[in-house]
Image (spheres, helix red, strand yellow):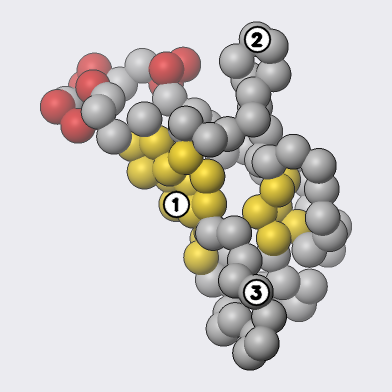
């Protein structure tokens, strides 16, 4: 199990609904083969979308792993068994 959360998006705007902060491995939308992608950006996207501010600046993504061999020993990590964060592009 895992969670992916976004941080560093600045203070929330008063009077606006809260933004989605992340996804868990149980709620993520997946392809038929089990793969998935998450889009981080200011424009609404279909599927797994995490909103980000329009202003430039860093956004930190935190991937937390639960109930994995990593918890017992870093030496037994199978990188194919856990999600990876890959930057696919940037609009700025």
How far apart marks 3 and 1 lie (CA) works out to 22 Å
How far apart marks 3 and 2 lie (CA) works out to 34 Å
In which quadrant is the C terminus drawn?
Answer: bottom right
Q: Residues within 10 Å of mark 1 (few under 14, many from 20)?
A: few
Q: Secondary structure at mark 2?
A: loop
Q: Position of residue 70 (x, y in %)?
A: 25, 28
Q: Position of residue 52 (x, y in %)?
A: 69, 65
Front of the two marks 3 and 2: 3
Q: Quadrant of residue 66?
A: top left
The correct choice, above or below, for 36 with respect to 21 in the image is above
Q: Position of residue 7 (x, y in %)?
A: 51, 65
Please give left or right for residue 76 compared with residue 90 in the image. left
Instruction: Say which residue appears at 47% left-offset and 31% top-offset.
Output: 26
Disc on the earlier residue, 1 or 2:
2
Tell me the residue that label 3 is attached to: 17
Residue at the extreme left of the image, as rendered:
72
The correct choice, above or below, for 15 with respect to 79 in the image is below
Front of the two marks 3 and 1: 3
The correct choice, above or below, for 39 with respect to 50 in the image is above
Q: Position of residue 49 (x, y in %)?
A: 70, 48
Q: Is residue 61 visible?
A: no
Q: Is residue 79 visible?
A: yes
Instruction: Say which residue appears at 72% left-offset and 72% top-offset.
Output: 53
The correct choice, above or below, for 82 with respect to 16 in the image is above
Q: Quadrant of residue 68?
A: top left
Q: What's the mark number on residue 33?
A: 2
Tell me the residue that label 1 is attached to: 62
Q: Residues within 10 Å of mark 3 (few under 14, many from 20)?
A: few
How far apart marks 1 and 2 lie (CA) works out to 24 Å
């Amino acid at each position: 199990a895992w969670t992916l959360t976004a941080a560093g998006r600045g203070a929330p705007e008063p009077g606006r609904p809260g933004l989605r902060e992340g996804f868990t491995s149980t709620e993520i939308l997946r392809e038929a083969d089990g793969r998935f992608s998450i889009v981080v950006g200011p424009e609404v996207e279909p599927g797994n979308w995490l909103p980000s501010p329009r202003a430039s600046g860093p956004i930190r993504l935190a991937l937390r792993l639960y109930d994995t061999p990593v918890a017992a020993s870093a030496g037994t990590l199978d990188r194919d068994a856990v999600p990876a964060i890959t930057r696919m592009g940037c609009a700025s």
